[in-house]
Image (cartoon, rainbow, N blue to C red):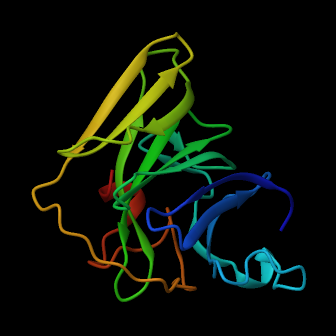
Amino acid sequence: MGRIQSACWAADGSVLLFAAEGDTVLYGAVIDCDIAFVSNGESLEKQACPLFDMSRVDVEGIPLGGPIRQIEADPKGRHVAVLFQDTDCIAVFGVVKRPQLALIPSSLIMGLAEEKPSTISFIQDFDSGSCLTIGWSSGRLQYYPIIYSDLGESHNKSVNCSYNSFNAKSIHGQVLETNVF
């Protein structure tokens, strides 16, 4: 694991999601705030568990994945958005907290022709769910609302060390690269 490229905290502040420079794997680490600032504490590398391998794949001729450039978690803790260095798509994942933290591919967002995503950020106080703001290379801003029918929350601080990838089979046996997005 190399230098950290991007990192963000899960909504409850107990899990740090991060990617290393040039890496395609999104990691999670449970951080115990009582020992986080102790000089002889465990290194992040020892605490980290891979959550999702985002190695580049082609989905119906559209390149997806690759090295991770930016990670953002929504304030309610239900979604994570990932921006890639070499592809023009943004991947949005649902966050499952029980029995262990896992990421489930949810949406794939693309811009208009010739646009590349420049930055992403979730709106902090969006009452109806989560809303991802996307800044595109053309200067256009896009809002991608995710409306929740149930605003209940559950909390769990464990991290699942068995992880998925864009090439993995889903829970229902369908190939993710052709059926999820």
Q: Where residue 179 sits: x, y (%)? A: 30, 58
Q: Where residue 87 sits: x, y (%)? A: 60, 37
Query: Can the viewer see residue 150 in this picture?
Result: yes
Residue 129 is left or right of residue 143, and the answer is: left
Residue found 52% across the figure and 15% down from its top = 114
Q: Nearer the viewer, residue 124 or 63?
A: 124
Residue 166 is left or right of residue 131, and the answer is: right
Residue 51 is left or right of residue 122, and the answer is: right
Quadrant, the N terminus:
bottom right
Q: Nearer the viewer, residue 140 or 131?
A: 131
Q: Nearer the viewer, residue 31 or 67?
A: 31
Residue found 73% across the figure and 77% down from its top = 36
Q: Where residue 172 sits: x, y (%)? A: 26, 78
Q: Relative to residue 116, is residue 10 depicted above or below? A: below
Q: Relative to residue 7, is residue 39 depicted above or below? A: below
Q: Relative to residue 17, is residue 45 depicted above or below? A: below
Residue at the far right in the pictured view:
40
Residue found 77% across the figure and 75% down from its top = 44
